Amino acid sequence: MKNSRVVTLILAVSGLILLGVGSATLFAPEAFLATSGINLGGQASLFSEIRAAGGALLLSGILILSGIFIPRMTFTSMVIAIAMFLSYGVGRVLSIGVDGLPDQAIVAATVLEMVIAFAGIFALIRFREA
């Protein structure tokens, strides 16, 4: 993948977002989710599921950021960023259709996830080397 400021910016933004959200979800899930009106209710099994997802987000953020510093990882990092943000965005859109409108913060996250996913797709097409 060609090195460009656009690619670096997309990887930096998406990696830092996943690093932050992953860390917050893994280490402080109750406080982080409360900002979106979600109450975990002290359920150990639910905490386990939430923290596991946080770990996956955190690791994904690290892998995405590695593509900025390790040129042979750039393409893979972009694919991971697209997959993560597109899967979350599409999942949330499906949930809105099935379950109804969530908290405003989650709607905003959905929009951001889709924007980052489509920016990544654009960059992947535009800057991919033959």
Image (cartoon, helix red, strand yellow):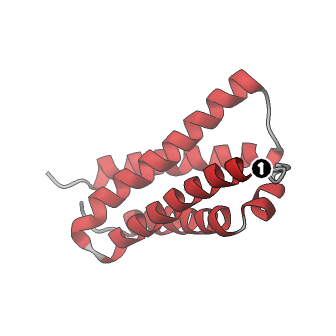
Vertically, is 110 above or below 91?
A: below
Q: Is residue 11 left or right of residue 57?
A: left
Using residue 99 as the reference point, say whether residue 41 is left or right of it. right
Give the x, y percent position of residue 83: 43, 46
Is 59 above or below relative to 97? below
Residue type at numbered disc 1: Gln
Q: Which residue is mark 1?
A: 43
Q: What residue is rendered at 70% in x and 22% in y?
A: 98
Splitting the image into 4 quarters, where does residue 74 fall?
bottom left
Residue drawn at the location 52% of the way across and 51% of the way down: 116
Q: Residues within 10 Å of mark 1 (few under 14, many from 20)?
A: few
Residue shown at 21% from the left, 67% from the top: 72
Q: Position of residue 35 (x, y in %)?
A: 82, 58
Which of the image's four quarters has the N terminus? bottom left
Q: Where is residue 106 drawn, in percent x and y?
A: 74, 46
Q: Nearer the viewer, residue 19 or 44?
A: 44
Up-down relation of residue 88 to residue 57 (above or below): above
